[in-house]
Amino acid sequence: KNEVEQSPQNLTAQEGEFITINCSYSVGISALHWLQQHPGGGIVSLFMLSSGKKKHGRLIATINIQEKHSSLHITASHPRDSAVYICAVESDSNYQLIWGAGTKLIIKP
Amino acid sequence: GAGVSQSPRYKVAKRGQDVALRCDPISGHVSLFWYQQALGQGPEFLTYFQNEAQLDKSGLPSDRFFAERPEGSVSTLKIQRTQQEDSAVYLCASSLDGLAGASSYNEQFFGPGTRLTVL
């Protein structure tokens, strides 16, 4: 079983829809990252959080430490949000990131 | 520059050739990470530097892979005698420090990656 599981693997939605991507993990962590990867490979860090909730523009990330679960929400989705969204956790025993497999999001106009 | 840069962005090599991939981290960032991302998969950790010291190279897949950061800033990932299975995107990331713990100081900032294709 992977230490970081994301769902869904693929998600196609219409412009304007509310999007939720889920991440569950099985290891002790010091922080959780949500990252965005566009075709071509470049990765952008969206959020780093260890508790509660963070908001940046139309993006919201939440984490429940007790349940070992995090969600990334996108409100009023737009075709430019189409990308792969990756959840990665920092093990509480070292600095390495443990990566989820990613969720491929396509937003249709 | 303001972010992490990598060069070249794309590299095509013939099997058996040596390649060198460069990473320029954000100025002042202590920690530098290299990741390998095969097509359709998540990134895999390769190696980690704190300043010029390579503290962890456990992810390097073979002795054909070598990384250095001699002055604690720019890093080079070298792959000798490239094989087709080396084809991947190589990502570099830097952070202000790399100590475990929920601190903005250890948020990793990623470069755009170098896409290596070995024919």
Image (spheres, grey):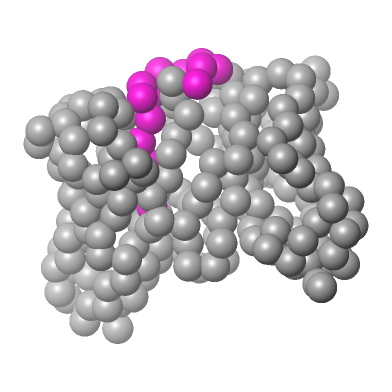
Q: Is residue B98 toward the left or the right of residue A93 in the image?
A: left
| Quarter of the figure with residue A94 | top left
Quarter of the image where one finds residue B6: bottom left
> Which corner quadrant holds the C terminus of chain B?
bottom left
Q: Is residue A57 above or below residue B30?
A: below
Query: Does residue A100 show up magenta in the picture?
Result: no
Q: Nearer the viewer, residue B38 or A18?
A: A18
Q: Which residues are magenta?
A: B91-104
- Point 77% across, 61% down: residue: A78
Side of B54 where B35 appears, left or right: right
Quarter of image, res A45: top right
Foreground of the two, B12 or A75 = A75
Residue B97: image x %, image y %?
A: 36, 22
Q: Looking at this view, is B112 or A69 the one in front?
A: B112
* Left or right for B70, reference A82: left
Residue at 16% in and 31% down: B72
Q: Is residue B35 shown to the viewer in this render? A: yes
Give the residue drawn at x 88%, y 51%. A18
**Residue B99 covered by magenta stretch:** yes
Picture residue at 29% right of the left edge, 44% below the top: B1
- Measured as percent of width and height from the top left, residue B99 is found at 40, 18
Residue B55 visible in the current orientation: no
A76 versus A99 height, above or below: below
Q: Check the image and report above or below for B81 versus B44.
A: below
Left or right: residue B53 versus residue B2 is: left
The x and y percentages for residue A29 are 61, 22
Q: Position of residue B21 (x, y in %)?
A: 22, 58
What is the tally of numbered marks visible in this picture? 0
